[in-house]
Amino acid sequence: MSIKPVLRFAPSPTGLLHVGNARTALYNALYARREGGTFILRYDDTDTARSTEAFADAIAEDVDWLGIRPDRVEHQSRRLPRYDAAVERLKAQGRLYPAYETEEELETRRLSRRRRGLPPIYDRAALKLTEADRARLEAEGRRPHWRFRLDGRQVVWTDMVRGEQGVDTATLSDPVLVREDGSYLYTLTSVVDDIEMGVTHVVRGEDHVTNTGVQIEIIEALGAKPPAFGHHNLLILPSGEGLSKRLGHLSLRALREAGEEALAVASLAVLTGTSLAVEPVADLDALAARIDFAKISRAPARFDPAELSALTAATLHHLPFATVADRLAALGVGGGEAFWLAVRGNLARLPDAAVWWRVVEGPLAPVVAAKDREFLADAAALLPEESWDGEVYARWMAAVKPASGRSGRALFHPLRLALTGAESGPELKALLPLIGRARALARLRGEPG
């Protein structure tokens, strides 16, 4: 029996999520959905100085807006005993050692190594300290940070996106896992959580490739088997600038407030930078079916807000009424499915539907040119009696056209202006039954209706 996959999205609640974060969240959530697995939302909130409940709430709101419902929610700040136990285990193995250098001292050493043509990595000076040295430093008021002693070997794995990958940990500094104040860094907490939660696949940005080599060593030191890893390319702005939570680039909140469709954001975030066509999808299941990690490019992917706006419109043009019914009701839009099918092809944003509902429901000040008054009065006289069906407009035009001798724009444009007050819009064939005979008559006569 095959093992169902377990994937996670582990944001830090230190800012608003942007579309780059959404890309990672969606890859994990949709892959888990497609394969019948589990998706975990896990808050990396051990940095108490920067993590806030407000940002955690915003993340939950954004994830919900995208439509990816986690099967499980975890907070690393509530799992400290697990990390305590892992630290003691690594200390007992001699893999975690105390170091006392200040950041200023470390920077001086890095500069010295650069001047000598050496890589600016930590020189492991702390491993040479005696018990007496450590006692003296602590007597001076210094508190240690704790570093993981790397094996200094080639760590290899088959990446779901990048293929065969390797990181030579001999070229890296021993990572700090525990800060001077006793708090834990993501490198440790992520590993412990992935092991204990049974995470089978870790899909994240390519900026974590080097970190993966380190984490595989820590995973193995804790006696576990590494999960499968996949490192996708990163989204960048059209200018080439990277996305930043701190700077608020393309935050999901801002996109939501601008009226962009969540499904369009999801489609563009997932499909940009792949060999797959970026196009509207019916729902997240359809998007999940298209995910293929092997088709993700190695180059950074440009996320263009203008392309998103176009995709939002295209997405709306294909959405069935059932998926928007509640949102239309919240906007005060009625008319049911008939109204939605009439107007959806003319929407750039969903709130635009309210504009067309006001056109239907009235009252509306018709636009009537002096030269067209007689024509419109004649057209009003030929308006069929109720009740109306979807063919009423065709029957009306069959009478108006020969009686007026008009055709083309001269026929249709004055009718559109009178009935909708707009130069263009949804087909009158679809709108007329919604407007109704009484309002239509008033408008054709130049009266508010």
Image (spheres, rainbow, N blue to C red):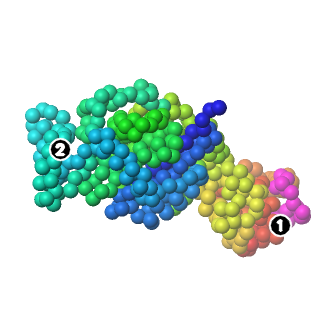
- Left or right of residue 151: residue 352: right
On screen, residue 364 above or below 235:
below
Q: State the separation of the CA atoms marked 1 and 2.
A: 88 Å
Q: Secondary structure at mark 1?
A: helix
Quadrant position of the N terminus in the picture? top right
Point out which mark residue 437 bears. 1
Q: Position of residue 169 (x, y in %)?
A: 29, 33
Mark 1 or 2: in front is 2
Instruction: Inspect the image, locate mark 2, and give the three-letter code of the amino acid beneath it.
Output: Ala
Q: Earlier in the sequence, mark 1 or mark 2?
A: 2
Q: Residue at x 68, y 69 (%)?
A: 332
Q: Position of residue 349 (x, y in %)?
A: 59, 57
Point out which mark residue 185 bears. none
Q: Position of residue 114 (x, y in %)?
A: 13, 37
Stretch in magenta: 371-394
Query: Is 91 covered by the magenta stretch?
Result: no
Is residue 392 something one can see in this rendering?
A: yes
Give the class, few, some or many, for how many residues have Cα within 10 Å of label 2's Cα (few <14, many ≥20): some
- Left or right of residue 266: residue 401: right
On screen, residue 163 above or below 199:
above
Q: Which residue is mark 2?
A: 126
Instruction: Inspect the image, locate mark 1, and give the three-letter code of the amino acid beneath it.
Output: Arg
Query: Is 383 covered by the magenta stretch?
Result: yes
Q: Quadrant of residue 213?
A: top left
Is residue 375 something one can see in this rendering?
A: no
Q: Residue at x 81, y 60 (%)?
A: 433
